[in-house]
Structures are given as structure tokens and as C-alpha cells.
Image (cartoon, rainbow, N blue to C red):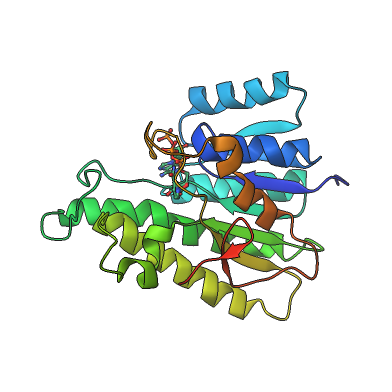
Amino acid sequence: MSSKLIALVTGANKGLGFETSRQLAQNGIKVLMGARKEAKGRAAAEKLQSEGLDVGFILLDITKSEHIKHVKKYIEKHFGRLDILVNNAGMLHKEEPLVSNSVETISLKALRQTFDVNFFGTVELTQALLPLIKKSAAGRIVNVSSILGSLAYQSEESEKFKPFAYDASKTALNQFTIHLSAALRNTPIKVNSAHPGWVKTDMGGPDAPMDVTEGAKTAVKLATLGPKGPTGKFFHFDEEMPW
Ligand code: NAP
């Protein structure tokens, strides 16, 4: 059994997931970097290993139950527990163009695909790993959400960016945070949602004001909360976001 904390980060081959893996490993945590494409996942892990960090690649498409089962077995066999789960993998469907409201036009296929990743895959993975997280002395679950999923924020008239499938899937993810944290209230496990900010990645685009180093900080902070830290909340850095 490893004395180091063990973390799993989904969608870790690029963007915020890659940087979150780097920052967690820089904190002395062993990080399993989940990625759905083997070559890209391995290359990402090798890059961080070349920086001297303790990371490894694991094949994980969160919409594939067989991958989830394998990841669970792997972690069980090698570590016997999981301390940190960062549910970072997410998608913004190409049918949802930037700066628009897609609610009248988005196909049900795109809506379902978005929910499959941002909500159903995340829930299935978390439920599967929960028995291993319960074996941790201080389990931490971070759901990487978005302020765009906030009902309070989206109901402000001034908010014009409304990719419907993405926003609704993140609203559902936030509800998962609230329900799971309530279910685990009498355990040491903390479950929170993170809003990274608008960050320069393939999803965020080149005009985003934040870089990934800053963007990963909220998830890293929530993944490494102490025993008195919050649970069932939604944060951007230290600021609590409205549901
Ligand atoms: P990104 O660069 O597009 O990265 C998304 C990651 O998710 C990629 O590694 C992608 O893998 C992975 N992924 C997608 N579908 C997957 C699946 N079925 N199984 C496993 N992995 C899957 O986007 P990002 O900006 O880093 O986003 C990371 C998270 O932050 C997302 O949840 C996003 O909603 C959230 N977020 C981002 C911003 C922003 O401004 N960038 C703002 C708020 C919230 P592939 O490379 O194989 O596609």
C-alpha cells in the first residue's frame, strides 16, 4: 500500500486535466491520469514524468462501463483505496457555437452526447469508485463544473452565452455534488463543484483571459482540502458561486 495520496484525474491528456494532474503531483500526490486515447494519454503522462512527477496513464473513456470497471479493479489491486477523484473530463458539443443560445436548434443527439460525458459518465465513474474512496482517511471528490451551469447566473438577463446542452449538463452535475455531499455528510469525504474560470484550452478558446496554471487552481484546492474544509459547495478560487 502506498503512503502517498492517490488521485485520479479524468480527461488528463490536455487542458485543465493535464495541468491539474501536474499541480497535484507537485504537491507530492501520486496521480493516475485518465485519458480516452491511449497515445495521447501516454504522451501526457510521459511529459509530466520527464518533469520528475509521480504520474501514470490509465485508459478511461468515462462513457464506457468496461473502462470504468477496469479502472476500479486496477486501483483496488494496486492501491486498495482512492483519496482524490477529480471529475474533469467534459465536452462542449460542436453544435453549440460560441456566444449563442442553442436551445431552439440543438439536436437531441448532441444533448444526449453532452449529458453522457458531463453527467452520466461522471456519475457512473464516481459511483463505481465510491467504495474505494470510502477506504481513504479523507476522500475528496471534485466535480469540474462551470458558472454557465448556475441557474442563478443564467437567469440574469445580461448573460448571453447559453450553450444549452453544456449548461444543463453542468447544472445536473452541480445537483450531483449537492446530493452526494449530503449522502456522505457523516463521512470524512468532501464533495464540491469547481468553476475554473474562463481558461485558454481547446474548449475555452484562445480569447479566454486565464491560462491553465491559474485555471487548475480551484480544482487542486478542493482536492486538497483539510478536514475543516467545506463540502457540498461550488467555488471559483475562494469565492463561493451561486447554484
Ligand atoms: P479540453 O481542453 O477540451 O479538455 C477536455 C478533456 O476531457 C480532454 O482530455 C478530453 O479528451 C476529455 N474528454 C472528453 N470526453 C471524454 C470522455 N468521454 N472520457 C474521458 N475523457 C473525455 O477542455 P478544458 O477546458 O480543459 O475542460 C476541462 C473541464 O473544465 C471540463 O469539464 C470543462 O467543462 C470545464 N470548464 C472549462 C472552462 C474553460 O474555460 N476552459 C470553463 C469552465 C469549465 P480528448 O482529448 O480525448 O477529447
Q: Residue 236 at x, y = what percent?
A: 56, 57
Q: Residue 169 at x, y = what percent?
A: 35, 61
Near-viewer residue (186 or 38): 186
Tell me: residue 85, above or below residue 56: below
Near-viewer residue (190 or 210): 210
In the picture, the quarter occupied by the C terminus is bottom left
Q: Residue 238 at x, y = what percent?
A: 64, 60
Q: How many marks?
A: 0
Tell me: residue 233, above or below residue 218: below
Residue 82 visible to an observer of this rendering:
no
Near-viewer residue (169 or 102): 102
35 relative position to 163: left or right: right
Indicate the quadrant of ligand 1 in the picture.
Answer: top left
Q: Residue at x 37, y 34 (%)?
A: 207
Q: Residue at x 69, y 38 (%)?
A: 23
State the residue lying farthest toward the top: 50
94 relative position to 47: left or right: left
Near-viewer residue (53 or 39): 53
State the residue lying farthest toward the left: 105
203 relative position to 137: left or right: left
